[in-house]
């Protein structure tokens, strides 16, 4: 077991390319209820970058190791009096700090400790690149479809960024559950691709009016359920497209993804949308 490891560390809030530095750090020691994981692969989620920019739903203490979502690796050691996966077993680790439990470290390092309750064994048939994306995006999509905003079979569900990984999963889960989707994309060449994934209707904001298309599809009253991860003017249009008493869940702000100023992270709502 090496005594030191490499880690990507952000000293302060800021644009990741400006604040991240490669550092040498001691390999951590697992405590009771923990496992030491040798990290094999970790994704770079948009939300990982937003955390470093100080514009996500939670903020770690700085300096911080980057990567606050998930990773895949092999169990190298277990803490004292800890029962868990076998040494050498490949596991995926859920590293989101917002999940209740002890503090967690970032995933952008060669070794990290993890609470064994955050560890799930990975089937051999999954590659490291697939396994390291096993938790966050699928569970996000599952919650968006079945928990918030709780769409029912036959409902129209309006979603932005339909071509994203979460968007595609929302489409497939909705089709499986009998929920109809209206999917918003930015590019014309993404329309047929989104339909091929099972999207019922696709709106391209490059050359179509979102509000008009929603009215044509769901009726002039609008839709009752929507999920948005774009924010900005598109998020405002989503709110305008809601029927009276409708519900929109906002889970991102991709339209302003390079801003570090919290004042720039807005959805310019019209009063009529919230009265």
Image (spheres, grey):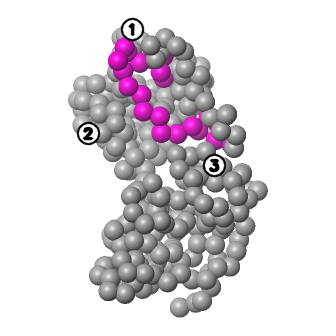
> Of callouts 3 and 1, which one flags the residue occurring earlier in the amino acid sequence?
3
> Of callouts 3 and 2, which one flags the residue occurring earlier in the amino acid sequence?
3
- Residue 148, picture quadrant: top left
The residues colored magenta run 238-258
For the point 33% across and 24% down, the residue is: 156
- Contact between labelled residues 2 and 3, with CB atoms less than 8 Å apart: no
- Residue 6, picture quadrant: bottom right
Q: Is residue 55 visible?
A: yes
Q: Nearer the viewer, mark 2 or mark 1?
A: 1
For the point 53% across and 68% down, the residue is: 105
Residue 180, labelled with which disc? none
Q: Position of residue 72 (x, y in %)?
A: 45, 69
Q: Is residue 172 visible?
A: no
- Crowd around label 2: few <14 · some 14–19 · many ≥20 (10 Å): few
Drawn side of residue 265 relative to residue 75, left or right:
right
Element at badge 3? loop
Q: What residue did someone put label 3 on? A: 54
- Crowd around label 1: few <14 · some 14–19 · many ≥20 (10 Å): some
For the point 45% across and 54% down, the residue is: 98
Q: Is residue 123 above or below residue 199?
A: below
**Within the magenta stretch, is there residue 246?**
yes
Q: Position of residue 110 (x, y in %)?
A: 57, 76
CA separation in Å, label 2 and label 1: 27 Å
CA separation in Å, label 3 and label 2: 36 Å
Q: Is residue 246 above or below residue 141?
A: above
Q: Is residue 218 above or below residue 155?
A: above
> Of callouts 2 and 1, which one flags the residue occurring earlier in the amino acid sequence?
2
Of residues 187 and 157, the one drawn nearer to the viewer in this rendering: 157
- The C terminus lies in which quarter of the figure? top left
- Contact between labelled residues 1 and 2, with CB atoms less than 8 Å apart: no
Q: What residue did someone put label 2 on? A: 176
Q: What residue did someone put label 1 on? A: 220
């Amino acid at each position: 077991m090496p005594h030191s490891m490499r880690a990507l560390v952000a000293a302060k809030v800021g644009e990741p390319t400006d604040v991240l530095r490669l550092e040498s750090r001691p390999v951590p020691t697992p405590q009771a209820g923990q496992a030491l994981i040798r990290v094999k692969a970790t994704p770079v989620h948009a939300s990982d970058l937003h955390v470093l920019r100080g514009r996500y739903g939670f903020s770690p203490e700085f300096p911080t190791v980057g990567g606050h979502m998930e990773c895949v690796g092999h169990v190298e050691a277990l803490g004292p009096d800890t029962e868990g996966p076998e040494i050498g077993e490949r596991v995926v680790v859920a590293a989101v700090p917002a999940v209740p439990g002890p503090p967690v470290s970032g995933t952008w390092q060669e070794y990290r400790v993890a609470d064994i309750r955050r560890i799930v064994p990975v089937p051999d048939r999954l590659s490291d690149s697939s396994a390291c994306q096993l938790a966050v995006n699928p569970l996000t999509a599952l919650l968006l479809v079945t928990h918030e905003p709780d769409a029912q079979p036959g409902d129209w569900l309006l979603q932005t960024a339909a071509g994203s990984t979460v968007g595609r999963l929302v489409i497939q889960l909705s089709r499986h559950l009998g929920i109809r989707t209206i999917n918003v994309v930015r590019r014309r060449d993404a329309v047929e691709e989104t339909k091929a994934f099972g999207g019922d209707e696709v709106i391209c904001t490059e050359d179509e009016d979102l509000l008009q298309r929603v009215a044509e599809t769901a009726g002039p009253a609008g839709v009752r359920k929507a999920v948005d991860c774009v924010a900005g003017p598109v998020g405002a249009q989503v709110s305008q497209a809601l029927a009276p008493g409708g519900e929109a869940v906002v889970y991102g702000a991709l339209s302003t993804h390079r801003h570090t100023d919290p004042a720039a992270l807005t959805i310019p709502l019209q009063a009529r949308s919230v009265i």
